[in-house]
Image (cartoon, helix red, strand yellow):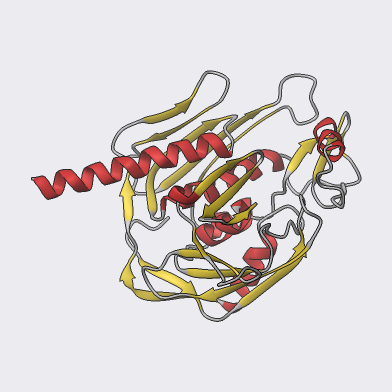
C-alpha cells in the first residue's frame, strides 16, 4: 500500500457474469466509475428504487461463511472477493450495479474481477486517499482463532496469516506474510480460490445450499487433496485467507497502515477488528478536535 496517494476509480464500466454459489442463480455485476469521496457502493438494480448499499463496516450483517452488507431492506452477500479485488488494486471509488443479492462465484477467486477492472484501467483522482495508521496493538478472538492489528515500523500494510487444519489433514498448516501492493495482490493473492473440506461441502448440499457448485468451481479437499482440481499454488489455501482479509479490511473505508497478523481467523473476527479500528480512528479525530 502506498503511504500517501490520491484516490482512484476505474476509467470505464466493466462487467462480470456468473452463477451464485449459494443461490445457483445467474448474476451480472457492472462496475462503474464513481466520483472522489463516494467510496464503494453496491446498487441493487433488481429492486424498486435501485437501493444503494455503501461498503462500510457499519452496514455489515453477520452471515455464516461470507461477508454480507445490508442497508434497510436491501442486502448484498458474498461481497468479499469483489471488495478484495477493488482494495487490492487500490480502486477507492466505484459503483457496483448487481441484479441479484449474491455476487457471482466465478472460479472461487478474485481473479475474474481483477481482470475485468484492469481491462478498463485504473485512473487517479484529485482528492487524497484517507489513511489510518495503527498506533497500538488491537486483538480480537481467543487462543483457538485470533487476529491482531499492530503498529509497523515501515509505512506499509503487512499481512500475515497462519492456517492450521491439524495433522493428518490434506490442507495441514500453511503460513504466509506479504507487503500489500497492487502488484503483490494481483500475482500472489487474486488467483487463490475458495476452499473447503469434502465433509463441509456435503453438509452444505444437504442443507440445500450450493447445489450447482462443483469441485471444478472451487477447491474441495478429500483425503488425498483437491478433488477433480489442481492447485494454483502449493499454499493456495492460506493465500485465499489473506485475500479474504484484504476484502474484509477494506470495509474500514481507508488505507490501513500497520501489520495485520491472523491465526485461523475468518470473516467475523476480521470484521470485529475493523469495527475497533474504525472506532479508534473516530476517537483520535475527536481528541484532535478537542485539543
- Toward the right, the furthest residue is 228
Quick check: 281 left or right of 94?
left
Name the one closer to the observer, 225 or 141: 141
- Toward the left, the furthest residue is 291
Total marks placed = 0
Q: Residue at x 34, y 56 (%)?
A: 3
Where 162 sits versus 233, above or below? above
Where 80 sits versus 142, above or below? below
Where 96 sits versus 239, above or below? below
Quick check: 112 left or right of 121?
right
Q: Residue at x 52, y 34 (%)?
A: 269
Q: Position of residue 138 (x, y in %)?
A: 37, 31
Name the one closer to the observer, 28 or 85: 28
Name the one closer to the observer, 227 or 273: 273
Q: Residue at x 91, y 45 (%)?
A: 228
Q: Quadrant of residue 209?
A: top right
Q: Position of residue 43 (x, y in %)?
A: 56, 68
Quarter holding the N terminus?
bottom left
Q: Position of residue 247 (x, y in %)?
A: 54, 51
Quarter holding the C terminus?
top left
Quick check: 126 left or right of 160?
left
Q: Position of residue 195 (x, y in %)?
A: 75, 41
Amino acid at each position: 500500500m502506498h503511504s500517501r496517494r490520491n484516490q482512484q476509480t476505474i476509467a470505464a464500466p466493466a462487467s462480470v457474469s456468473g452463477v451464485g454459489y449459494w443461490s445457483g442463480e445467474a448474476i451480472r455485476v457492472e462496475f462503474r466509475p464513481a466520483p472522489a469521496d463516494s467510496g464503494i457502493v453496491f446498487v441493487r438494480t433488481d429492486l424498486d428504487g435501485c437501493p444503494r448499499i455503501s461498503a462500510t463496516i457499519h452496514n455489515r450483517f453477520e452471515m455464516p461463511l461470507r461477508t454480507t452488507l445490508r442497508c434497510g431492506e436491501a442486502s448484498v452477500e458474498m461481497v468479499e472477493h469483489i471488495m478484495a479485488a477493488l482494495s487490492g488494486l487500490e480502486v477507492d471509488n466505484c459503483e457496483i450495479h448487481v441484479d441479484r443479492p449474491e455476487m457471482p462465484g466465478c472460479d472461487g477467486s478474485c481473479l475474474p474481477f481483477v481482470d475485468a477492472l484492469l481491462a478498463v484501467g485504473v485512473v487517479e483522482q484529485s482528492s487524497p486517499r484517507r489513511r489510518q495508521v495503527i498506533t497500538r496493538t488491537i486483538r480480537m478472538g481467543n487462543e483457538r482463532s485470533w487476529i491482531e492489528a499492530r503498529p509497523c515500523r515501515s509505512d506499509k500494510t503487512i499481512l500475515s496469516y497462519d492456517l492450521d487444519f491439524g495433522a493428518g489433514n490434506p490442507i495441514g498448516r500453511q503460513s504466509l506474510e506479504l507487503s500489500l501492493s497492487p502488484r503483490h495482490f494481483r500475482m500472489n493473492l487474486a488467483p487463490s480460490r475458495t476452499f473447503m473440506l469434502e465433509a463441509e461441502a456435503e453438509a452444505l448440499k444437504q442443507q440445500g445450499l450450493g447445489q450447482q457448485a462443483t469441485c471444478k468451481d472451487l477447491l474441495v479437499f478429500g483425503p488425498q487433496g483437491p478433488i477433480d482440481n489442481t492447485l494454483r499454488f502449493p499454499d493456495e489455501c492460506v493465500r485465499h485467507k489473506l485475500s479474504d482479509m484484504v476484502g474484509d479490511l477494506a470495509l474500514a473505508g481507508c488505507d490501513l497502515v500497520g501489520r495485520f497478523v491472523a491465526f485461523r481467523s475468518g470473516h467475523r473476527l476480521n470484521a470485529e477488528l475493523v469495527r475497533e479500528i474504525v472506532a479508534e480512528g473516530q476517537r483520535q479525530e475527536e481528541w484532535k478536535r478537542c485539543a
